[in-house]
Amino acid sequence: MNRIFYYSNKLILLLIMPMFITYGDILCQDSLKELDLFSYKSRLKFGNHLYLEKDYLRASYEFREYLKYEDNDTIRFKFANCFYNIGRYLEAADNFKSIFYNSTIQDESRLAYYKSLFFSGDFNLFRNSSRNEIYLPEKYLSEVNRLYFTSFLMDNSVLPDTANFISAFPDSNKNDIRNFYIQKKFPQYKSPTTAALLSSVIPGLGKIYVGNITDGLTSFLVTGVLTFLAIDNFNHKHSFRGWLFTGLGAFFYAGNIYGSAAAAQIFNAGVKFNFDNNVKLYFEKRNYFLPENNL
Amino acid sequence: MIKLLGKLILFFFVSLVSVQAQYQLSSQFDYANTLFKTGNYFDAITEYKRLIFFDSTKTFFYRSSFQIGKCYKAGAKFDEAIKYFSISELNASDDFERFDSKIEIVRCNILRGTTSRAHQLLNEMELTYSGNDSKDSINYWRGWAYMFEDDWTSAAASFAKINPNHELKLICNRVEKDKVSVTFATVISYILPGAGQIYTGNFLSGLLSLGWNVLSAYLTINAFNAERIFDGIAILTLIWQRFYRGNIQNAAEFAESKNIDIANSALINLQKQFRGAKP
Amino acid sequence: MIKSIIFCLLLVPTLSKAQTDWVKWDAVEVSYKISNASSKNIITQKQNTGSGIISFLRNIYGFFISELDGDNCPFYPSCSHFFVQAISESGMIKGPLMFADRFIRDLNFFKGKNSYPIHRIGKFYDPVSNYTLNEQMIEIALSGNGGD
């Protein structure tokens, strides 16, 4: 009995086997599609994984392939955002444009578009499009407006009216913004002309005015000693030495006038560098008063 | 009976699918390897990453991450390379694989110039692996680390542990012999100005230095003899002292730069000519 | 100011790390050469700048004196290099004035108190381009980041 059971078992298996193989093939082909590493669905999965890993360039390749087969606004947004994160802002802006209409995330895309233009560093382009175009996101009008005013702190355009400028920012930050505004409008520069004039009256005074006090004193001493030597030698009828020291004195006197002007310019460049840096750090720390996007 | 049959069916189905999947994955691995071999490292990384992502059984995890590390290494992105070699180390299935990953990390550290980290890793490895082959391998890479540190004596000692007549040991010995002594160059310059420069082969500079020192010494002594004390002190401090100090500085600098040139030409030769394993 | 500069320097490495694969890269061959950090090598690279008679005189000065009397100038580029560079870039009128100014600044005993950035070879970084009276050319170099 047992044996019969055993054989029948085998027989069934033998009968079923070919069936399995044929069906199995069909089943496998289905599952193969699932497993095809280069199908558009796989591309999407892999792309999302790369996106989370911040491997944005590779993610953008995968999304591009995916978008050839299926249209999906979220993926379009992510695709554009890849370029934004890499720092290819103008490409990002172009890609965000494709989600401006008839989409649930059109406002987010529009905001991202303005962000891209802003961070591209072409503030004129940004300001023109944020004033004139019809792309403005209804949900994020105040954000774009803030970016508009922030851009003025970052380049050399003529600053807009104070009241408008400051009212665009939240109350708690208004003081800081006012300070930045004042510093931008009336920077604490030292005039190179004044420095040069001061140095031509008293050697070294221009340098002291700029803040390089020891440099100023040194050049006062050097020109002073050379002048003294010149006069002393003329008094003792050493006319060659007299003229030599006169020449040297004049040389350093002129050099100091020139150097005072240059020092004032270097001072100004330092002030500007610090201001730009502080503004950048301040806004970066507050994410430019923009909402975090969770897409 | 039916239970058994059910199990059989399930097993059959699963194995068929997984065989197909394995086939898919291994052909993906081959594809990535082709990219790697043709030097297409950036794209190779993409494909290895794809393989890792879809490889649910983690069959290719070790090999892929190891290869990604190699790609980054080829692109001189050592931080990333070390990261991926460490991942491969964590996913290694046996001690050999683990050893290979660690050695790769050491090699990256040598190339990156962080040789102290390489030494630290090699010391740790020495405690774990006691086989003769692994000992040799550890000493070999320790030798390379020393060479990159410009410490040729220690490098020679490391290679000698593998084989007293090791090819690299002989090279290290030769470099050590060719090098000049910075201390000696400095000391003889103190005694005879210019001697240090001449010792390092800069004859013209040495002679000029000697000339300046003799001239300023003559002028100084002359001035003191003629009781022109102020002139004497001026020449002594402004000219003689300057050239004397400069001569010593130059001797040390020439010796150092000559040593670096010797070391560099040896290293470049190794990079271009040496046929064995290189970092 | 210093705080903000340090902050900037801290930011740079964290940013650059994430960016490894944001631009497609190719294989790079790493040279096994040990870098020679001595200041002389860096300066001699610039020795051929300059023109005509001034450069000739400077080469003579360099060969007979400056190469032999040790390392005396606390600035990078050194005063004599500054002179040649200033003349070749700004002409015979501005150049000497720039040099006169530099010379006085070199005489200043307390120059360390001024805010010169430190070049990576350990000297005060004071490039000619800062003194041409052209605001665009002034570089506010971060510490250790100055120069070529």
Image: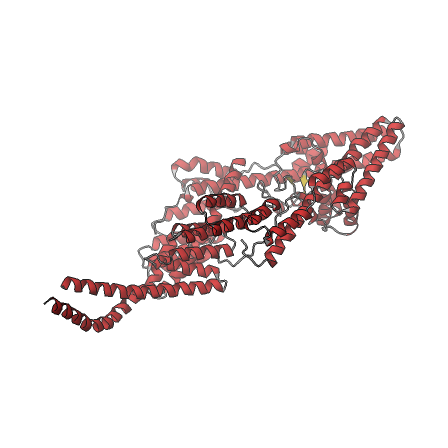
Q: Quadrant of residue B4?
A: bottom left
| Residue A131 located left or right of residue B226 | left
Q: Residue at the location (59% across, 50% down)?
A: B164
Q: Residue at x 40, y 43 (%)?
A: A289
Name the residue furthest left. A1
Residue A266: image x %, image y %? 62, 40
Residue A282 picture location, percent across and down: 46, 40
Q: Position of residue A7 (x, y in %)?
A: 15, 70
**Residue A78 in view in this figure:** yes
Q: Nearer the viewer, residue A12 or A38?
A: A12
Of residues B182 and A207, the one drawn nearer to the viewer in this rendering: B182
| Residue at figure coordinates x 59%, y 57% from the top left | B274
Q: Is residue A231 left or right of residue C12?
A: right
**Residue A262: x and y, percent?**
66, 40
Number of marks in the rendered image: 0
- The quadrant of the picture occupied by the N terminus of chain B is bottom left
Between residue A244 and residue A56, name the one nearer to us. Answer: A56
Q: Is residue B112 left or right of residue C75?
A: left
Could you tell me if residue A202 is visible in this image? no
